[in-house]
Image: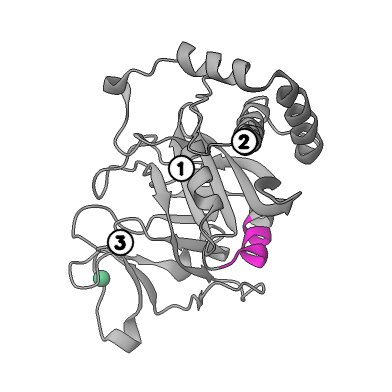
């Protein structure tokens, strides 16, 4: 697995620079640890990796930067960003306290890590507090349009949480799903979760969400296609796993992990989906 060590380095003092590298290597270590499968204690692994890499310092990281060459032509739609650059930027974004990072692997398999912002020794850093297996769209990553059953790549915000089950105590805006709740795919309310009674809309191309259990027992509505452009893709959710080892373009996680994320996350939660 390739881990790009492109170091963001706009800080001028050596001390600050070293701290930046520690954060970058920490995240890289997190990603590499994830590559080894489910780890028993991610926090312990992170700490030990960070310490050992820190001693090797600037030279090792810069060497790695030069040795990795990406082929731009191979990139999937939405893939053209660097996960660690995004995490670095989000460190300074006070509205964002958590990140759900989903790595797309082979086929429909993925791996999810929930990162929480910490402040240790005056350094803002990301700590993994939960990780689990995931499923992505039947046709893999790189969504571009409605019906391609692909999962979009990129950095996304959250519109709301939802559930057929009751609100587990989330700070996100929560939509309790009833038989009147639809994820609308019609032009009128495209890419929006609506209540048929409230809107008076007879939904012919949407999902009647109440009948998608256990998938929609809990879920998060991402802001993918935030302008709701008709045909560009709709209803990209993070939701619970069902019986199928794939989704229609969403991300599926075990229900326990979904509940954990809903209980912990703030409305500034960011979702990063990447294929390496
Ligand atoms: Zn509709």
Residue under the image location 33 percent in, 88 percent down? 198
Crowding near pointer 2: few (<14 within 10 Å), some, many (20+)?
many
Picture disc at residue 27 = 2
Instruction: Please state which of residues 76 and 175 is positioned toward the viewer in this rendering.
Output: 76
Asked whether, in this view, residue 254 is left or right of residue 6, the answer is right
Res. 226 mark:
3
The residue located at (35%, 55%) in the rendering is 224
- Residue 134, given in percent of the width and then of the height, sits at 56, 42
Dot 2 or dot 3: first in sequence order is 2
Query: Does residue 31 lie above or below 183 as drawn?
Result: above
Q: How far across and how far down the image is residue 26, in percent?
A: 66, 34
Residue 242 seen in this snapshot: no
* Secondary element at tag 1: strand
Of helix, strand and loop, which mostly describes the magenta segment? Answer: helix
Label 1 sits on residue = 273
Numbered disc in front, either 2 or 1: 2
Task: Please rate how many residues cluster around mark 3, counting C-alpha atoms within 10 Å: few if below 14, some from 14 to 19, many from 20.
Answer: some
Judge whether 154 appears above or below 265 on screen: above
Q: CA distance from mark 2 to mark 1?
A: 15 Å
Q: How many marks?
A: 3
């Amino acid at each position: 697995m390739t881990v790009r060590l492109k170091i963001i380095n706009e800080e001028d003092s050596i001390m600050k620079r070293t701290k930046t590298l520690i954060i970058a290597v920490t995240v890289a270590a997190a990603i590499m640890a994830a590559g080894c499968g489910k780890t028993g204690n991610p926090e312990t692994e992170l700490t030990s990796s960070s310490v050992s890499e820190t001693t090797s310092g600037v030279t090792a990281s810069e060497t790695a930067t030069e040795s990795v060459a990406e082929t731009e032509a191979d990139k999937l739609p939405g893939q053209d960003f660097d996960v660690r650059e995004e995490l670095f930027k989000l460190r300074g974004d006070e509205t964002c306290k958590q990140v759900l990072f989903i790595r797309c692997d082979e086929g429909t398999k993925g791996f999810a890590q929930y990162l929480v912002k910490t402040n240790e020794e005056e350094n803002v850093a990301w700590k993994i507090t939960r990780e689990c297996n995931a499923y992505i769209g039947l046709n893999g990553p790189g969504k571009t349009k409605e019906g391609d059953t692909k999962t979009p790549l990129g950095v996304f915000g959250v519109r709301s949480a939802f559930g057929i089950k009751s609100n587990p105590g989330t700070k996100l805006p929560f939509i309790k799903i009833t038989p009147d709740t639809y994820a609308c795919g019609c032009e009128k309310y495209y890419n929006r979760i609506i209540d048929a009674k409230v809107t008076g809309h007879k939904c012919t191309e949407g999902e009647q969400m109440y009948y998608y259990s256990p998938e929609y027992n809990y879920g998060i509505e991402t802001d993918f296609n935030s302008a709701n452009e008709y045909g560009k893709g709709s209803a990209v959710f993070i939701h619970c796993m069902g019986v199928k080892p794939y989704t229609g373009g969403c991300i599926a996680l075990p229900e326990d992990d979904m509940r954990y994320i809903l209980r912990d996350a703030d409305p500034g939660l960011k979702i990063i989906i990447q294929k390496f």
